[in-house]
Amino acid sequence: MSYRSGFIAIVGPPNVGKSTLLNSILGDKVAIVTAKPQTTRNRITGIYTTPEFQMVFMDTPGIHKTQTPLHKSMVESAKAALQEVDIVLLMIEIRRADDPEIRPIIGHLRKAGKPAVLAINKVDQGRKDQLLPIIDRYQKEYDFSAIVPISALRGINLGGLLEELKNLLPPGPQLFPGDMKTDQSEAFLVSEIIREKIYLYTREEVPYSCAVTVETMAEDPEKGLLSIRAKIHVETNSQKGILIGKGGSMIKKIGKEAREELEARFGVKIFLDLMVRVERNWSKNAKALRRLGY
C-alpha cells in the first residue's frame, strides 16, 4: 500500500505555538490562539490530507506542573495522547529552550516509545547562533527522528517539518474524508471562539475561571439566520461583574467579536445570546468538570 496515514500528537510546554502550528498547516482556524498560556484545554483534532498521505494531528494542552483539578485534567489528556498516536511532535521555543517543563515531557516520550520529531519554534525571534547549540543538546537528550527549526506563525520551514513527519507515517488508508479539516462539532467550535474572546479581552484570573457551553443552535433557513444560545460559567460574582462590564459593555464586546467571526465561518447571519452564570469552584469539582466537557 503506497498511501500513508497516521495520528500525530503535538505536545510541549504551554504557549510554545502548538495551536498556531496546527492552524498554519491546515490553512484554517480549528484551534483558538491567544498570548495567554493554557489557552488550549481540550485535545483538538486537525486533519491534513494530500494525494499521498493523511496526517491527523492532535493539538494537546500544554504539559506543565499543576495542582488544580482543571489543569490536571488538561495535562492528563495530553499525556494520554502520547499512547494513542503513531508519531509525537514535540514543540519547544528557541528563546525558552531551557524551560524546565521540557525534560519531564521527554520522560513521557521515553515511556511512550513512539517515533518523535522535535520542532524548535519561533526561530525568527531568536538569534542564529542559539540554534546549533540547542539542536546539539536535544540530539543528546533524546533519539529524535529529526529536529526541525520552524516559525509556525510565519510559515517558515513547515514544508520541511511535514516532510519529516511524512517519512514516519505508517502505510494505511485515508482515515477521514479529504475535505474534512477537523472532527470537532460545530457547537464545540462556537464555544471555543467565545472562550477565545474572553481570553483576549479579560485579565488576571477571569479567563482561567471561565467555561463556555452551547445550550442551543437553531437555524432558520427562510431568514438565513442561525440563533445560538451559550452560557459562560464563572466561579465568583466578582468575575461575573468583570465579564459583564459596566452597562454590559464587556459582554457586548465579547459577543460582537465572537458573532462576527462565527458569521464569517458559517456564512450566515447569527444571533448570539450570551448568559453568564456563577457556578462556584467549578474548576475544582470533578462532576462539574465532566459536565462542562473536561
Image: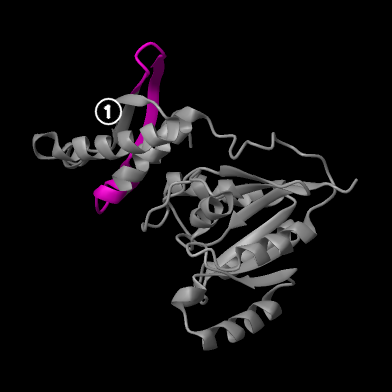
Give yes or no for residue 174 being in the magenta stretch: no
For residue 35, above or below residue 135: above
- The picture places residue 113, in percent across and down from the top left corner, at 76, 59
Q: Quadrant of residue 179?
A: top right
- The picture places residue 131, in percent across and down from the top left corner, at 57, 82
Residue stretch in magenta? 200-228
Q: Secondary structure at mark 1?
A: strand
Residue at the spot 54% in from the left edge and 57% down from the top edge: 21
- The picture places residue 130, in percent across and down from the top left corner, at 53, 85
Residue at the spot 40% in from the left edge and 57% down from the top edge: 37
Q: Quadrant of residue 181?
A: top right
Q: Nearer the viewer, residue 274 or 42?
A: 274
Most extreme residue toward the bottom is 129
Residue at the spot 52% in from the left edge and 30% down from the top edge: 185
Report the quarter where the N terminus lies. top right
Q: Nearer the viewer, residue 283 or 208?
A: 208
For residue 288, above or below residue 152: above
Q: Amino acid at mark 1?
A: Leu
- Is 184 left or right of 37, judged from the image as shown? right
Residue at the spot 14% in from the left edge and 34% down from the top edge: 248
- The picture places residue 110, in percent across and down from the top left corner, at 72, 64
Give yes or no for residue 221 being in the magenta stretch: yes
